[in-house]
Structures are given as C-alpha cells and as structure tokens.
Amino acid sequence: MKVIMVMFDTLNRRFLPPYGNSWVQAPNFERLGTKSVIFNNCYAGSIPCMPARREIHSGRYNFLHRSWGPLEPFDDSMPQILRENGVYSHLVSDHYHYWEDGGATYHNRYYSWELSRGQEGDFWKGEINDPTIPEHVKIARETQTIERMGDTWRQDWVNRKYMNTEEKFPQAKTFRKAMEFLKTNYEADNWFLHIETFDPHEPFYVLEKYRELYSDEYDGPHFDWPDYSIDDTSPEQKEHIRFQYAALISMCDHYLGKILDFIDEKDMWKDTMLIVNTDHGFLLGEKGFWGKILMPDYNELVHIPLFIWDPRSKKKNERRNSLVQTIDLAPTILDFFNIEIPTHIQGIPLKETIASDQKIREAALFGQHGSFVNITDGRYVYMRAPGRKRNRPLFNYTLMPTHMRNMFTPNELKGMKLQEPFSFTKQCKTLKIKAYNPAGSSYGGKNYLFDLKTDPHQETPIDNEEIETKMIKLMIQLMKDNDAPDEQYQRLGLEYK
C-alpha cells in the first residue's frame, strides 16, 4: 500500500473548476475530480502555514495553545509514526518555511527529504548590491503601513534573477524530484510520498506561457505581490492580480497532471491512496481585504479544497458533504497502513466518509492564535471576537520557543512560567509565555454569525440568539475537548465553568 499526498499552499477552492469555477484553466484538477472523491465541506483548523502543518503531523488543533512554531517534543508526528512502523516516508518540497526557525523540526520526521530553494523571500542567493526592482514596488514597500517580513521582498527580486526558465522554478524542481522518487520506487510497497509546493502562494510570479492563458489587458505598474492589507486597489489592478493568481494555478495544474499521468501509466490506482490538499485560502479583494491573518477567518480563507482517492472503496467522481478538517489527514493515512492511531490524535479517519459520506463530527473549530475563535456545523459559521481591545490574557504554551524567523527574545522569556501539563503533552510541563496581540482585526468588538445556506458568500451577518447560543455551546465543548487554556475563554468572554 502506498500514499501520495500533493499539497499546494494557498489553494483557493473558488478558483478550481471542480468547485464551480468556469474561467480558470485547470484541466488536470477537473480530471482529478473524476478520479477521486471531492469534499464539499472541508475546513482548515489552524492557519496559516506551519500551524496547518503541525495539524497534518499531529492530528489536533494548534491555534488554541500557541502561534507559529515547530513540532513539539510531545507531538505525535504522522511521518515519524509511519517510519516507526516500517512505512517509508519521503518529503519533496519548496516550502522554505521548513528550514526557518519556526518550522525546523518538521522535515526531519520523514525518513528522507529533498528541498528546493528560492520561493518568495527565501534567503537563497547572496547578492550584496540591490537587485533591479520596479520603482512602483519600491515605493509601495517604503510607504506600506504593515511591516511585511523584513527584507524578504528584496530577496524575492534577487531570487527571480535565477528563475529565467521554467525548469529553474522551485515548483518545477520539486515535481522533478517527486517524479524521480516515483520512477525509482513505484514498484516497492509501504511508502508515503509528500509532495508539497509553495505555489500558488504569493508572490504570483509565473512564466508568460501561463499568463497568456488569460486575457489580461492591465498596463499599470508591476503588481504581483499584494500586501496583507485593506483593499484599496483599482478594479483593473484587482482583475490583474486575480489573473496572475489564476496563471499560477494553471502552472500547478500542469505539474499535478504529471503525477496523474504517472499513476495512470503504472496503474497505481489499485493500491495507492492519492490526497490533494492545501493549508488555507487567500482573500483577493473579497470582503475588502488582501491576503490572510489580518481579517476575520472568512470562508475564502478556511473553506478549502480536498480530493481523495482511496483504493479500498474505489469511489470516484463523487462528492461528500460531511464536515472534515485538516486534522483528519494524519489518522486517515495511519489507518490506511493499518497503524494504531495514538490517543492524542483527535482527527478522525476518513475511510467511511470516503466510502459512504459517513458523518464524523457535529462541528469544527478553526482560527489563528490570539484572533477570533470560529466554529461551523456546515450550515452556520460563528466567529467569536476577543472581548477587549488589548486581547488579554493571551499566552503561548511551548517547549520550542521560536517564531517564524527568529527565537523568542530574552524580553519575551523573562516573564515565562512553567505550566502544568495539558492532557496531550504526555505529562510534560510547558513554558507559559505572554503572547503579543496579533496584528489586524483580532479585535473587532463584534461577533459574526452567518447562514451559509442563504448567504454562502458571508455578506450579511444574521442576528439569531437561539442559533448563536447553540454555536457557543458547541464552541465551548470543542474547546474543552481540546483542553484549551482558561484564558482563551476569558479573552473571548465565554462562560465555561
């Protein structure tokens, strides 16, 4: 038995033909839909990047206890469990956060791994002199109101110089490495291949051959990397950036096709599970926002695509409406290899949901550390805002005190305390470190309730005390099930005792 998981970062379901898009050119995603089960109600749990990957490894929510960070010593890591049970796991990726401080423990859980350099602002090629950067881009960076990852935008323009042909793009290199693994090992048994590309994450830098698929008549200043900000762009710029994003999806589609071709050629469908997934979506001007993180967690961010082919049930070209999440991937893969699922994993194997749309949960939590806590039952979405502007109390609970690109500072660590073990930390105490108030709309002073049946685009919040009370009750129960720290209830103004 074998598993191939193809993971794209920032893949919007509303841009995919199997989810109703009629203008993005992605024939291989259409083809994938005919060869797999399409999940209509898949939600992220913790976002953004590394919080989602911690969920893929550990099968439980990240965002209630800490922000971005590595795997913890007490985490159950799915690839590590596979390795310990005789299943070979291999990662090929260009997702450069894996070799930063805040992601450094993930790739080493696999038996082997290969990484391709150069995505976004990956500090890859060393050039002391400034690269040539379009004037508009320089002005935008100098006048922006939100600090965007330090010098990564400058480094991005350095990196682009080394991607003048398609085979030099990180995504192309990643899939080339994946094909090498497949050609070498397709006849072997008991392996898991995790193929992961940073695309179509911003910046939406893509070759002209993919841009030519779209009739983009924009002639304004260079614009392919929107800041995480309020949308103040012109309609022409907005259309342009959406075409750029669509072109990058078309590139992703091209390389997805290579995997599908190989599975067809070698008739791997009979014994190989295929999962195609993402970590989160992206706002491209909808709701008046660009990006992620700064706004409430609307469905554009968290209602994500998921495709699975399971050779046990052989179900394909069918849809499933049951509510599933990222935390379900680890137990699904372990179950496929008949490996016992650790008790601390809270996701649920999707075998029966794939086979017959079996319901596995009543509701699903999702969110970002320190921001809104959100819940959906598939019909309604309830977003609970912090009750105070200072968003206190708020702490990180960790034994791996690193942020995205740096360690916790001595000032952050001065007030740390030891926290008594949580139910999932295997009798280990953790550090309890005061967390900063995340940027953006974590404090809105207002809760939101949406009815997705009558308002699928979440344009008009409803006021229904009975439904809100029901959703709050479900939220509190799921937070308790995940052993959320007391202050999470306090900062949200929830009565939970």
Image: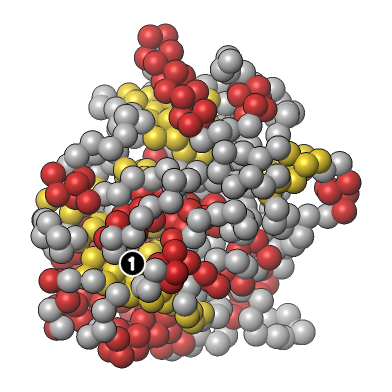
In the image shown, does 37 or 128 lie closer to the viewer? 37
- 50 is higher (above) or lower (below) than 451: below
Residue at image coords 88%, 46%: 414
Left or right, residue 236 beside residue 109: left
For the C terminus, which image quadrant?
A: top right
Rendered position, 497 above or below 323: above
Q: How many marks?
A: 1
Q: Is residue 465 visible?
A: yes
Picture coordinates of residue 370 (x, y %)?
A: 63, 37
Q: Closer to the camera, 256 or 225?
A: 256
Q: Which residue is mark 1?
A: 5
In percent of width and height, residue 18 lies at 20, 54
**SS category of the residue bearing label 1:** strand
The image quarter in which residue 252 lies: bottom left
- Answer yes or no: is residue 439 visible: no
- Residue at the image position 22 percent from the left and 51 percent from the top: 351
Place of residue 43 in the rendered image (x, y in percent of width and height, measured from the top left): 37, 43
Residue type at numbered disc 1: Met
Q: Residue at x 47, y 77 (%)?
A: 111
The residue at 21%/45% (across/down) is 353
Q: Is residue 109 left or right of residue 350?
A: right
